[in-house]
Image (cartoon, coloured by chain):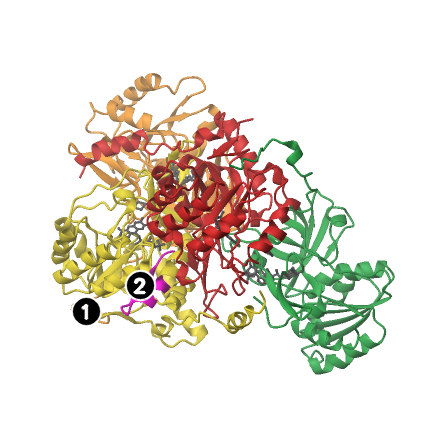
Chain colours: A red, B yellow, C green, D orange
Amino acid sequence: MADLSVRIGSLALRNPVMPASGCFAVEYQEALDLGALGALVIKSVTPKTRVGNPTPRVAEVQGGLLNSIGIPSKGLDAFVRDVLPAYPGFGTPVVVSLSADTVAEFAAAVQVLSRPGVAAIEANISCPNLEADGLAFAMQARSTHDAIAAMRRATPLPLWAKLTPNAGDVAAIARAAEAAGADAVVMGNTALGMAIDVHTRRPRLGNGMGGLSGPALKPVTLRMTYQCARAVRIPVIGCGGIASAEDAVEYLLAGATAVQVGTASFLDPGAMRRIVDGLHDYCAAQGVARVAELTGAVEMEGEEQRNWRAQAAAWA
Amino acid sequence: MADLSVRIGSLALRNPVMPASGCFAVEYQEALDLGALGALVIKSVTPKTRVGNPTPRVAEVQGGLLNSIGIPSKGLDAFVRDVLPAYPGFGTPVVVSLSADTVAEFAAAVQVLSRPGVAAIEANISCPNLEADGLAFAMQARSTHDAIAAMRRATPLPLWAKLTPNAGDVAAIARAAEAAGADAVVMGNTALGMAIDVHTRRPRLGNGMGGLSGPALKPVTLRMTYQCARAVRIPVIGCGGIASAEDAVEYLLAGATAVQVGTASFLDPGAMRRIVDGLHDYCAAQGVARVAELTGAVEMEGEEQRNWRAQAAAWA
Amino acid sequence: MNCTDIDDPHAARAAAPLRVASHRCRVTAHQAVNARYRYLRLQAEADLASATRPGQFYQLRCPQTSALQPFLLRPMSVYGTGPEAGTVEFLYAVAGTGTQALATLAEGQSMEIVGPLGQGFTLDAAARRVLLVARGVGLATMAPLVRQAAQAGVALDVLLSARSPADAMADELLRAAPATVHAVFDSDGSSAVDRVEPLLAELLAAGCDAVYTCGSERLALLLRRLLQPHPQIRAEVALEQRMACGMGVCLSCVRPFEQEGRVALQRVCREGPVFPLREMVGGWHG
Amino acid sequence: MNCTDIDDPHAARAAAPLRVASHRCRVTAHQAVNARYRYLRLQAEADLASATRPGQFYQLRCPQTSALQPFLLRPMSVYGTGPEAGTVEFLYAVAGTGTQALATLAEGQSMEIVGPLGQGFTLDAAARRVLLVARGVGLATMAPLVRQAAQAGVALDVLLSARSPADAMADELLRAAPATVHAVFDSDGSSAVDRVEPLLAELLAAGCDAVYTCGSERLALLLRRLLQPHPQIRAEVALEQRMACGMGVCLSCVRPFEQEGRVALQRVCREGPVFPLREMVGGWHG
Ligand SMILES: Cc1cc2nc3c(=O)[nH]c(=O)nc-3n(C[C@H](O)[C@H](O)[C@H](O)COP(=O)(O)OP(=O)(O)OC[C@H]3O[C@@H](n4cnc5c(N)ncnc54)[C@H](O)[C@@H]3O)c2cc1C
Ligand SMILES: Cc1cc2nc3c(=O)[nH]c(=O)nc-3n(C[C@H](O)[C@H](O)[C@H](O)COP(=O)(O)OP(=O)(O)OC[C@H]3O[C@@H](n4cnc5c(N)ncnc54)[C@H](O)[C@@H]3O)c2cc1C
Ligand SMILES: Cc1cc2nc3c(=O)[nH]c(=O)nc-3n(C[C@H](O)[C@H](O)[C@H](O)COP(=O)(O)O)c2cc1C
Ligand SMILES: Cc1cc2nc3c(=O)[nH]c(=O)nc-3n(C[C@H](O)[C@H](O)[C@H](O)COP(=O)(O)O)c2cc1C
Ligand code: FES
Ligand code: FES
């Protein structure tokens, strides 16, 4: 069996497969051995209490899902008291995902969440479902830097910055997160999308717009994972449309050190286990001893393409 | 039969359905009555001669297509001499799509292309397949303004700005295009994506990355069409993943005045005819007298959502 | 730095028994019941019959076809289980993409289902007479409860509401269990609220220990009102809502409920689909 | 402003006859030919038999299944047409997503094909003896040419290269047409270039008017070399390339060709799939 372990900075994971925030909760222990995952990433919590968006909160599109859940949250105290205690104890690092409205809120919250049982904090600076047509910290390098730097000062825990595919220049934003002290970037969240019911003439989500996830998103987030991995030295965690071990390998080859699985779990709550098993199979079939070898191992140009570029000037 | 005619500025179209640039050429006259379309949009031409990218130039993904054709072009003279003459004469307005590397090149080329038989010029300021990780004029409001303003000064013809979904803030870019004198914006081009063959460890496109098109793209370009239509007073032409009359209606409801059909024609060269027919059926079934009534007619919030927002504060 | 030691066996909770799984099933029967409803029987490897409680549901992975490509799974109440351990039955209305695709499945083909999911009905051991109120395909959800009640020797009153006698499916609901059936129809006006109301009031007053309903918000809200003078009667409603995960994870399937005078959101897939009828709030469909 | 008058009938070109269409067909036969190849016969409404020339192809819309979701159409040479006007036949190797999905189609089901597409082979009226060189599934592309040649009374030499005798399918290629067949195999080493070379040289020297090849770049390049002393022999090769539109629109299917000492890109779907063999450039697969 191949060695599937990977390191995200100081954090050692038994394998590179973990859930994506909002697509996982302890309820999955009924369908999955949580002790067999690389990490457990909890649904984002916000300092402020939030009810979430009106229903319908999900709508399917071709090859994907739109959601406008809206990050319902009972606040930090309720989270620490009622939610968090269920997660440690599976022998799997617990990652808390945090979303907030201001830099100060982010920094204060990160302090509250830096507590025993929490292995890392993922800063969801990218959620597109909030106010303002999806604008978020991670849309700009400056606001990314401000938020991450403030959190960096407030916690000794590993800090991951979760970026958004809605941004125009993710490489610059990944660099800003790195410069501000992030230990890893997660690439990425959902892409803001929309669907309209042509009979009712209403949006198919109660909130009008929502985040696109699932296979339809994969080509874009995979490309961005590649761009981020080229741009920074900290690990990149790939996310977007991963439903199989092959999908996970694509992200690793593109430069990811680990991957997050979201929507695929909704279609099969055992998806993450299948992906871990499939990584073993892939490594065995390809003679890969350590899955970490795959990170960034894509060969961008083959011989035929090199020949083309060498010769094509003469063809025009 | 409903009145399907629409106006894009001074240009009257018999219906709102036209091909997307690069997904159409006169060869389709073998499969389609070109006299039944709203407009004929030709494959982008560039002032410089270009061979295009190495093969493979297309790869399928779930719900979509990646392409890295790379805009092969024999230059403007060859275009005007060998390509253009085939298009006028179907009784359908001909739209020339232009791509270029610099503002000056754009402006000079637009002058060459402003000639009899050309009804409008679409400025492809957004093609993500070129150099520099897909950076393009339409990634920023400033460069959009510069390019469109220069073209505006150089031609009396209707000028459309084709935007890219890779940009972070398309509303701002649409406003820049409008301010610079564009007569319409087209939203939009492909989204930069990637796919890797996990066996060869090579990208599945010869160029490494390429543009995502087809249904997988639709939720994002539909949302951006909505955002653009809210941001500008000039018409918005929707594009991305349209394969049926219902898809076209979604774009119209979101705010588009007309739509472009790309990848769907590859799956059925008669797709545009089916869409026109389907628009007639939809209008008949819904009692819509003029298709133009549909533009922007989405009702963003229903009663249930209003009730939710009114009451939810008390639920937290 | 807080570097969890991933190999410390003492840190690991005992892995919970995996209650929910994706089961690959063979279609052993699939036929039209009438113009709108279809009956589907599946055979799994696992013992779904003893794992599944009345009122629970599964999420069905409807097939992909050239014309229909449902992305999400579709929630369906269990209509029956057994006699074999791996047998599970559904009764469904052909509605949109997913159920249309489902309808194309031929006997002998296979499909996946995820479950069992959600909280079912509660039938008190002491109950002697219960009332079931179902409309439309809501009867699918009720059928296992009919069977449980019949087996426990509980007397059954059933109010069946349907568009027309052709849609009523009393036999499909009872499956030979003894019951007093009151069928009402849109087609003859007997299903109108003002005509059902006295009938229901009478049935509630006639010494009923519990009432269960599914398939009509209108009837559920009527029942809730008629129950006000009968606080001792258990009352449960099975509800629907758009779902993604079906397991309580994604928070897509929430509805507002009234609990102790306050409104709070509950997950239909997890706290439900069966809820105390008295907590139901009308007007939320998603 | 240049506002084209959209209602001016004088401006409109006469609409061209629609040569290419998406045809909905019924599967009238679909069976394995051997372990790797399958035979598919379709029945369309339109007269595809007289519209289709040897060497042309169609794009097949492979079905969507739960396991396989091909997005693009798949190009396939026409293996045969007729006897009925709407009948078209394909012979294909099961390879990846699309062809695996195709293989699930049952007789009686329907599917869409787009075509006919591309330029076929040219058989000169004056030809008396021609040589066909095919490897693997390349024979599917050749079969209509065999028939055309046989009908025209042209003598046929056929070199068939295959992995093993089980894969050779000479009968499938000839379909009872008379021909001299030379079969070579990987399994006994007879298909090696140095063993095929003298055989081909001899066949070319024996008075052959044209040579056609498909299915092996190695053989095509060998032939091109051996043809140097025979400028009078017509030589054509059918090539493959990844396609999206199949109609010359998208420019995805290009390959470099040598024309008058210069290299230029041609569209395999439009200028091809049949090209002058002497213009072929090796080493480009896409
Ligand atoms: C717990 C539960 C049990 C159910 N039991 C049954 C049953 O036994 N028999 C039966 O016929 N139907 C039942 N339903 C309703 C059934 O789930 C929907 O009819 C079905 O999902 C419609 O799918 P579609 O693809 O045909 O429709 P589409 O309109 O194409 O569906 C689009 C999306 O909306 C969702 N959706 C549509 N209608 C409903 C609905 N009424 N409830 C929840 N989601 C919906 C779909 O799941 C899908 O995600 C149940 C619903 C729930 C929540
Ligand atoms: C003009 C033409 C005629 C052909 N005729 C035949 C025939 O008669 N019989 C036959 O068995 N095969 C034929 N082929 C090859 C056939 O198109 C491929 O085997 C088929 O597309 C593979 O699809 P897949 O989904 O099984 O493979 P996948 O690997 O899943 O295909 C992925 C993508 O690559 C493309 N692709 C893969 N292999 C090829 C190839 N060799 N050529 C072109 N595109 C490819 C597919 O079309 C698809 O777009 C022909 C190809 C061309 C271009
Ligand atoms: C229903 C749903 C809820 C989500 N909630 C959150 C969230 O609370 N915080 C967050 O950072 N991302 C959230 N996401 C985004 C996912 O974590 C993930 O980034 C995205 O879905 C893309 O991955 P996927 O294609 O594998 O689903 C949510 C996604 C879905 C579908
Ligand atoms: C093969 C291919 C070539 C394209 N070439 C061009 C082009 O030359 N110029 C351009 O502006 N857009 C080009 N596009 C983008 C399309 O015009 C369109 O914006 C995009 O494909 C999204 O629409 P669709 O999903 O309907 O295909 C191309 C797209 C494809 C798939
Ligand atoms: S469906 Fe996901 S929480 Fe209920
Ligand atoms: S496949 Fe589109 S040009 Fe050949």
Q: Is residue D137 above or below residue C74?
A: above
Residue B237 is labelled as: 2
Q: Nearer the viewer, residue C243 or B171?
A: B171
Mark toward the viewer: 2 or 1: 2
The answer to whether D37 is drawn above or below residue B225 in the figure is above
D222 or D265, nearer to the observer: D265
> Residue C226's spot in the image, x, y percent?
75, 77
* Placement of the C terminus of chain C among the 4 image quadrants: bottom right
Range of residues picked out in magenta: B225-241
Residue at point 15%, 32% (across, down): D261
Which residue is nearer to you in this view: A246 or D239? A246
Q: How would you rate the neighbour count of disc 1 (Cα within 10 Å): few for under 14, some for 14-19, many for 20 or more?
A: some
Which quadrant would residue B151 be assigned to in this image?
Answer: bottom left
* Chain on which label 2 sits: B
Q: Is mark 1 within 8 Å of ligand 4?
A: no
Identify residue for label 1: D3
Query: Left or right: B118 with respect to C266?
Result: left
Residue type at mark 2: give it: Ile
Q: With D166 as the anchor, is C75 left or right in this view?
A: right
Splitting the image into four quadrants, where does ligand 2 fall?
Answer: top left
Q: Which chain is home to disc 1?
A: D
- Give the secondary structure at mark 2: strand
Q: Mark 1: which secondary structure?
A: loop
Vertical order, D166 against B290 (above or below)? above
Q: Nearer the viewer, residue D108 or C241?
A: C241
Disc marking residue C49: none
Where does the image place residue C23, in percent across and percent down from the top left?
Answer: 65, 45
